[in-house]
Image (tube, grey):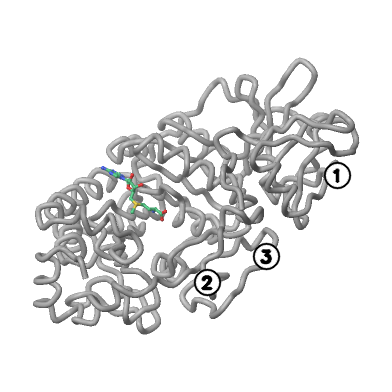
Amino acid sequence: MNFPKDFIDRVSADGFLGAELLTALNTEPPVSIRLNPHKTKPVLAFSDSIKWCLNAWYLEARPQFTLDPLFHAGCYYPQEAGSMVLDSVLRQLDLTDAPKILDLCAAPGGKSTLIASFLGNKGLLVSNEVIQSRARVLKENLTKWGYSNTVVSNNDPRDFDRLPHFFDVIVADAPCSGEGMFRKDLASRDEWSTDNVQICAARQKRIVSDVWEALRPGGFFIYSTCTFNEQENEQNVLFMKEELGAEIVDIDLPSPIQPGRNEIGNYCIPGKTESEGFYIAVLKKADGKEKNSKWTTKKDVRPMKSNEEIERFSFSEGIDFYQWNEKILALPYVEATAMMHVLSQLRIVKFGTLIGEMQRKGIQPHEELALNPFLLNYDQTIELDKDAALNFLRGDTFTLLGEVGYTIITHKGQALGWIKHLGNRFNNLYPKDWRIRMRP
Ligand code: SAM
């Protein structure tokens, strides 16, 4: 049991967590996934469903996700079960039909894909990650999940003061000391120290204070970590209550998820809950006068009339097209003005659904289009079996008969990406940085 000594001493003295936590942290972690309700269901060995999240399952064993084409198609997201409590929390909040939600610390995208499914193509998700390389992974995961009402940004929390009172909900899944990951991620044991707990707690206070202005009066703030200590959890919630004037909101979660110390927030604790460690609390910003700042727009993003070429892609209703230099974007028209305002204030990595780029010979379609289940009814497709699909995902090209032109590769009916078909061979357009290297 190679846990840091200070951690063992603290947990042993802390009657709240229970000594069985240390034993549980040395057992095999459960494996769980959340399904994308708008895509094909994968063929995996499902065991029980997860009772605090829709469309979520434990698996009997850990498969090689990388070697399953449907994983790359965004049909499911492997996510540890504790984090999925966010679904129950969101469903209990008194929200409008189409809320604007900020996921502030979002990479690699577990909570963001959950929020996107919760919104179900209504409202707006701004999914932010401050570290650029991690923002790229977040973009990939949200592209594969496939919704148009999504923006990915790469900003520091303090940049959100440019969007005062803009969001109905802010989720801050804060960087933390990671005690709840000691089982799954052995490196987190080495990185842990009592000093680091203090550093994390101070950073978390800074993050929540910096972003607070972006929450509208009466809006909800969801604070979470994957750690067990009081400083980073209950004490930070009390800080938000005392320093930011927030009200703590009670949330009803099924047992064995348990209330936090002094009933502040809720915990998933390995050994009690079939999950890793997770803490979640909800706060409400006091009602008050909303700042009515004027929404700005990006002048170089212009509405565009649909034309014959775009119509080939046969879009669902409620989508408008915009042109941004050579890029053609699809945005849900109800949210387009709000999205434009976000675009004008933040550093954007992904914006709505990028249909493609205007080129001399027409539109070169983009992978965001292929992977969006709401937009496309494009009939030039080729179905590949698992081995051929994996070769496509590796970026290979091989002999394949078909009609000349842009063609979507599918596996079990689910789009994976584009090729440019030349008749009996093709150019593989699968993005270079998404290509898989693993061979069976
Ligand atoms: N929500 C993510 C998910 O469900 O997949 C996991 C987020 S992880 C717990 C915390 C994230 O906060 C990391 O991606 C990290 O890069 C980011 N982060 C690190 N320092 C930060 C800071 N000072 N402000 C905001 N985010 C930060």
Determine which residue is flagged by label 1.
Answer: 379
Foreground: disc 2 or disc 3:
2
Q: CA distance from mark 2 to mark 1?
A: 36 Å
User: Residue sitting at 26 percent across and 59 percent down?
Assistant: 178
Residue at the disc numbered 2: 61
Label 3 SS: loop
Name which residue type carries label 2.
Ala
Q: Residue 29: horizontal and vertical position, in percent?
A: 39, 71
Q: Earlier in the sequence, mark 3 or mark 1?
A: 3
Amino acid type at image mark 1: Asp
Task: Identify the residue at image location x=77%, y=53%.
Answer: 385
Residue 331 shown left or right of residue 108 in the figure: right
Q: Amino acid at mark 3?
A: Lys
Residue at image mark 3 = 41
Mark 3 C-beta to ligand 1 under 8 Å: no
Write down the quadrant of residue 400 in the picture.
top right
Relative image position of residue 128 (x, y in whole percent) = 41, 43
Q: Earlier in the sequence, mark 2 or mark 1?
A: 2
